[in-house]
Amino acid sequence: MKKILFLLFAVFLGARECTSYETCLNLYKKAGGGELAVKHFYVNLCSQKNPQACKEAAKYTGFYSHTSNKFLESAKLYELGCNYGDGESCYKAGEFAVCDNIHAAYERFSKSCELNYRRCDSDICEDPCVRALNIKQNNILSGKKRPYDVFNMYKPTKIAPDDSTFAIDACEYNLHFKYKNTTNCTYAGYMLLLERNYEESRKYSKIACDMGDLVACVNIIALNNAEFKEDKAFTKDFLKKANFACKDKDFYNCGALGMAYYNGFGMKKNIKKAKDILTNSCLYANPFACISIGDFYRYQEVEPKKALEYYYKACDLGLNRACVIYDEVVKELK
């Protein structure tokens, strides 16, 4: 009876003041309860179609439960969170489904992408748009290939054709569903530039640049130089925005300033400044900064092992070109 009264009190208290796992746990412990009460609280809220509660309940079950079926229970809770409209829950539900039901995984990743979920930290990037496209691009839905991305998503191995095809498809996918993820369009512009398809490169780079991606703007400056179409006004505006990004601690777009210093776009080359900015931007999950600093160590400092560290990270962050370069450098070192 005492336990039932406590749980009722916990739910009443939590409904008013509990906003996260940590605060719930503290409140319930102060009230004389424990971690089990926290789970009951979240499961109860989840049953009321609260997506955040479903997600928290799934995290609690996955990390703290000692039952043999804890992963199955977590998967079900993430599935509920996804159904109620939480993008992170959809992503996690997709990861649980990818081994057993690739069609369900594709649907969950696509929904997570549609809900604009994306999270990056220093070790990994969770990008549902890319995961959904990887499945579709590699004909996994038709059963022609094993789903390579089950556990090897972030290892240095080529995950798509080493050309612009995949990036263009990914960019068009984002545009079709009006997602605000510019990385794929920037990458399309980058790959098309390497292929010397300047017209198409300008098209996709401009799309991302107009959406505020300064790395894509660097592509445009490189194109202007390649085609002898210097646009001083554009470059001046870019430098103004890039400097502001650095001051504002927008580490992704700040990396574009490092690229400008590295190539001497609109300014005198300054390799030291470029190195410092790009290293910091890479640390904050800018894959284009990582591949640039990898190039620095490969060609400027001639330290291939050091270069591998940055190519590895760029590959981890989903830049397929970096995976290819990583494999090339490994072969050179053998």
Image (tube, rainbow, N blue to C red):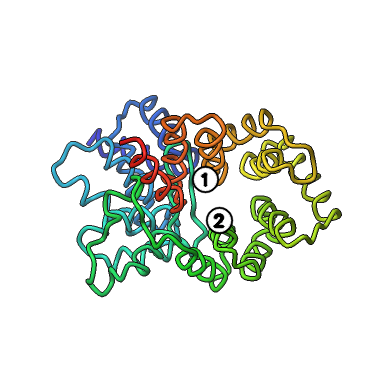
Decide: is 322 above or below 178. Answer: above
Disc 1 to disc 2: CB gap under 8 Å: yes
Q: Quadrant of residue 264?
A: top right
Estimate the x, y position of residue 51 in percent, counting from the top left: 42, 55
Q: Quadrant of the N terminus?
A: top left
Residue type at tag 2? Thr
Estimate the x, y position of residue 290 in percent, counting from the top left: 52, 40
**Front-most of residues 301 and 101:** 301
> In the displayed structure, does residue 94 sit left or right of residue 235?
left
- Which residue is drawn at the image coordinates 49% and 38% (left, top)? 17
**Front-most of residues 213 and 85:** 213
Numbered tag placed on residue 183 in the rendering: 2
> In the displayed structure, does residue 286 sit left or right of residue 75?
right
- Which residue is drawn at the image coordinates 56% and 64% (left, top)? 179
Decide: is 114 above or below 14. Answer: below
Numbered tag placed on residue 287 in the rendering: 1
Q: Quadrant of the C terminus?
A: top left
- Which residue is drawn at the image coordinates 45% and 41% (left, top)? 311
Element type where label 1 sits in the image = helix
- Which residue is drawn at the image coordinates 56% and 46% (left, top)? 288
